[in-house]
Image (tube, helix red, strand yellow):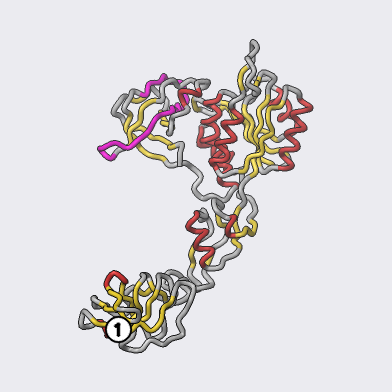
Amino acid sequence: MKPLEEAQTFVIGSCPPMAATDVEFADAEGLVLAADVSATEQVPPFDNTAVDGYAVVAADTATGEVELPVVDEVAAGAASDHVLQPGEAIRIMTGAPMPAGADAVVMVEDTERVGDDRVRVRATVEPGAAVRRAGDDVQPGDLLFPAGTVVTPAIVGVLASINARTVSAHPRARVAVLSTGDELVEDGRPLAPGEIRESNRRMLAGMLRETGCDVVDHGTVRDDEAELEGVLRSAAAECDAIVTSGGVSMGDYDVVKAVLGRIADMTWMQIAIKPAKPFAFGTIGGTPIFGLPGNPVSSIVSFEMLARPALRRMMGHRKLARQSLVAIADDDLSRRPDGKVHLMRVLAGFEDDGRCHVRSARAQGSHQLAATALANAIAVVPDGDGLPAGAEVAIVMMQG
């Protein structure tokens, strides 16, 4: 059996980042920058007020209370052409440009309007009070976001503010997902003997979307080699990767294995983990294909440990793995020696002691999806007799 780390190195190393493209900044959210982004404009572009109030000459407020004539009013998006003189005030709204001659702003809460054209100032302010200087946030030439940065909504806002209309980024991977088998039922009708309801494809499509991929759903393909070959060749030509489940065990003779063995360059693995020991990886015309085991829990674990980090690398991510923690086991994590690392599904959460604690997500069978559905972490339990309650255990979070 192949160690998990060796399998991960092989699969991830076979999935290099996709070529970068120029993307409109508004469409870049969630993508990974392929080139540094530096500012070409200053932000803010001009001195402006941080508050609603009155633009003044700070020295006029030295006595703590003064009455000044209001000679103009300026809102955000406008500007005053009046050069403020000592002994005058201009009504000003948040974000509006500072009038020439003014060096401070008094908050409206510290003033009282006197009639229509005068204001009483009841506070002393220093030069620069409530003024946001031009370039206070960003200066031309500043390196804002290095290559490898994931574009968040806040970064989109910054790109807009510096007029970066396009950025170089790795695209989202278009990933085909399909299931195979005459036994799979999707239409809600009563099951006949030997039939099961299709679930893996829908589950994997959601996991792919959570990874940041664009999903191309090829549906359920019948157990027909010619039909499956056609679907796989079409998917390989149109997509960046393919995910299938089932038909990858060493003893299986399945149409998936038969077709992939003929049209793809495949590596069939037995990995020293439980669940998800069988796994296949290869390429069809250069397009990676991930062959996950058919049991639903095994499919989840294979995806998390092998397919997800490889797809993230294809999309330019530098952080490939989920967050890892050392947690406290609140339950016995029992197992028997078998030469494998057991990847147990657990419920993880931080307790009052500041430590992350985990408890088993009930049944651990590779077919028992309902017991796994609420798990938010995988506990890595080394070969042996397991871990007692109270022991430390390495976990991999399955969220975030």
Quadrant in which the C terminus appears: top left
User: In the displayed structure, does residue 71 sit left or right of residue 233?
Assistant: left
Confirm whether the magenta stretch covers residue 335.
yes
Quadrant in which the N terminus appears: top right
Few, some or many residues within 10 Å of mark 1 (<14, 14–19, 20+): many
The picture places residue 393, in percent across and down from the top left corner, at 36, 32
Q: Is residue 133 above or below residue 174?
A: below
Q: Residue at x 69, y 26 (%)?
A: 256
Q: Is residue 343 above or below residue 165?
A: above
The residue closer to the viewer here, 204 or 333, is 204
Q: Residue at x 55, y 36 (%)?
A: 207
Residue holding disc 1: 68
Confirm whether the magenta stretch covers residue 108.
no
User: In the displayed structure, does residue 285 sit left or right of residue 250?
Assistant: right
The residue closer to the viewer here, 116 or 296, is 116
What is the residue that sits farthest to the left in this orientation?
63
What is the residue that sits farthest to the front in this orientation?
115
Q: Residue at x 43, y 30 (%)?
A: 375
Q: Which residues are magenta?
A: 333-354
- Picture quarter containing residue 359? top left
Number of on-image labels: 1
The picture places residue 160, in percent across and down from the top left corner, at 54, 64
- Picture quarter containing residue 293? top right
The residue closer to the viewer here, 183 or 3, is 183
The picture places residue 277, in percent across and down from the top left corner, at 54, 26
User: In the displayed structure, does residue 236 sit left or right of residue 39?
Assistant: right
Q: Residue at x 45, y 23 (%)?
A: 371
Q: Amino acid at mark 1?
A: Leu
Q: Secondary structure at mark 1?
A: strand
User: Is residue 103 shown to the viewer in this render?
Assistant: no
